[in-house]
Amino acid sequence: MTQRMPILWLDETDSTQNELARHISDYDNLSVVAARLQTAGRGQRGNKWLASKGKNLTFSMLLKFGQGPLPILRASDQFRITKAATLGVLSYLDSTGIECMIKWPNDIYHRNKKICGMLIENVLDGNNVSYSIAGIGLNVNQREFPINLINPTSMSLASGKEYDLESEMEKLHVCLRDSIVSNLNADDDSSSYEGRLYRKGEFHEYVRCSDGTSFEAMITGVDKSGLLEVRNRKGEREKFAFKEISYII
Ligand code: BTN
């Protein structure tokens, strides 16, 4: 029988990331804190994460490396957490029939719209990752979004169904835990991640953030550290870090 890891539901907190960080020693490895409302949800690049009360899944999962089923993880391998977590969310979404892709590095897209975002915060101890707080915001039943959000969608908009948040959280937790434990205990491999990478193998327009110029390129993959690898029509290859390239969608 698979071991159940606890899910703690809070009616309201500032951010489940902050909640876990404040009480780190109270939480078991691979446990989750979920909130019906975050008053100061945090997104990537210092943005806010906005989600209507009681409509979506907003939660954080604690990963303590070198404890229980999680092996020691070198800091240089931290992109493996992103690969395992994104594949866990996809495995859950596949089970609901909503086929999604990973928009590098860790957004989940349904068609050309964002259905899920992640904020993975790692705490290092020397050359290793001590623990990680993986924050996930999955749009579930919300059907209307503030106009300033770029390309949002939800499971409900994708499928026409309404979902029970607590039972979906349980299923998603199992998928995440299984993906994280199995991927981090196996040899590092990017093929599953790259196999679900949004816009891989097609030419599209991108913006180089350093100077705002646009260029046409094809995503070819990611390297071990998580840099995005692209090539242009002349066959010239280039790698980008997060914040160095933006997609035109
Ligand atoms: C993004 O900008 O795409 C990342 C969004 C991450 C949001 C989640 S919601 C649960 C957790 N708590 C937070 O404050 N942020 C993450």
Image (cartoon, rainbow, N blue to C red):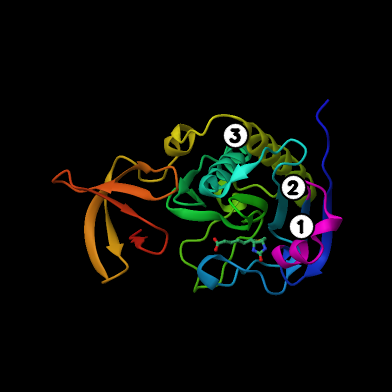
Instruction: Nearest to the eye among marks 1 and 2: give it.
Output: 1
Kindly identify which residue carries mark 2.
Answer: 169
Q: Earlier in the sequence, mark 3 or mark 1?
A: 1
Residue 34 badge = 1
Question: Badge 3 is on which residue?
Answer: 183
- Residue 180 among those drawn in magenta: no
Q: Residue at x 54, y 72 (%)?
A: 46
Sort mark 3 into few (<14), some (14-19) or many (20+) by Cα contacts within 10 Å: many
Asked if residue 23 lies in the magenta stretch, the reply is: yes
Q: How far across and how far down the image is residue 41, in percent?
A: 66, 69
Q: Which SS type dominates the magenta stretch?
A: helix
**Marks 3, 1: nearer the viewer:** 3
- Residue count near mark 2 (Cα–Cα under 10 Å), binned few <14, some 14–19, many ≥20: many
Element type at mark 2: helix
Going by the numbered disc 3, the residue's amino acid type is Asn
Residue 1 placement (x, y as % from top left): 83, 25
Most extreme residue toward the top is 1
Q: In percent of the image, x 71 and y 68: which residue is there?
A: 15
